Amino acid sequence: MIIDGKDAVLGRIATFAAKSALEGEEVNIVNAGEIVIIGNKNSILHKYLERRRIGTMSKGPFFPRDTKGIVRRAVRGMIRDNRYHGREAFKRVKVFEDLPEEMKGKDMLEIAKARTDKPIHKIKIRELANILKQNREI
């Protein structure tokens, strides 16, 4: 199964991917940088920067800075990965920054898109990752 992440909401993609992986399907999420998180941009940035600050150099929890890691972390939060069944399901989830060559031309699922007809507060994962990479000292 290939899920297109362009303008899709992170939570909706993560729940769908987690459920499908637990049912035994191989899940590929493409266009991870185009996935959006809905909410106030400043509060989202504050939340993720605070999570990055908590993880010290030798102790966790460690939170990712790249787009693929942010999406995988969201999916992991919806799978009980401390159990064998959950670990095996999480191994079936693959995340790609863009659309790989071998997946071009194949059918892709489109999960509920972010509503763009109204002005809505949102931030793309790619923008969030760039900000997290720049704030290394926090």
Image (cartoon, rainbow, N blue to C red):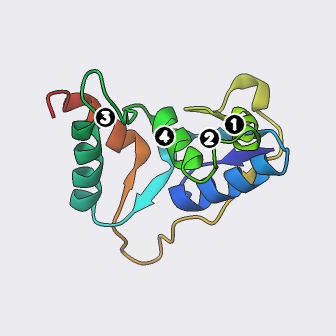
Looking at the image, is mark 4 or mark 3 earlier in the sequence? 4
Q: Residue 115: percent from the left, percent from the top?
A: 51, 71
Q: Which residue is mark 3?
A: 130
Which sits in the foreground, 61 or 32? 61
- The answer for how far apart the CA atoms under marks 4 and 2 are is 27 Å
- Which residue is denoted by mark 4 in the rendering? 33
* Badge 1: residue crowd in 10 Å (few <14, some 14–19, many ≥20): some
**Is 69 on the left or on the right of 131, as rendered?**
right
User: Residue 102, percent across and down?
Assistant: 78, 24
Q: CA distance from mark 1 to mark 4?
A: 25 Å
Instruction: Name the residue: 50% across, 46% down.
Output: 34
Q: Give the foreground label among 1 and 4.
A: 1
Comparing 74 with 109, the one in front is 74
Tell me which residue sits at (29%, 44%) in the image. 51
User: Can you say whether 97 is above or below 73 in the image?
Assistant: above
The image shows residue 46 at horizontal and vertical percentages of: 21, 53
- Under mark 1, the amino acid is Arg
Circle 1 is placed at which residue position? 87
Q: Is residue 5 left or right of residue 125?
A: right
Residue type, label 3: Asn
Residue 55 in view (yes/no): yes
Task: Name the residue type under label 2.
Answer: Asn
Q: CA distance from mark 3 to mark 2?
A: 30 Å
The answer for how far apart the CA atoms under marks 4 and 3 are is 10 Å
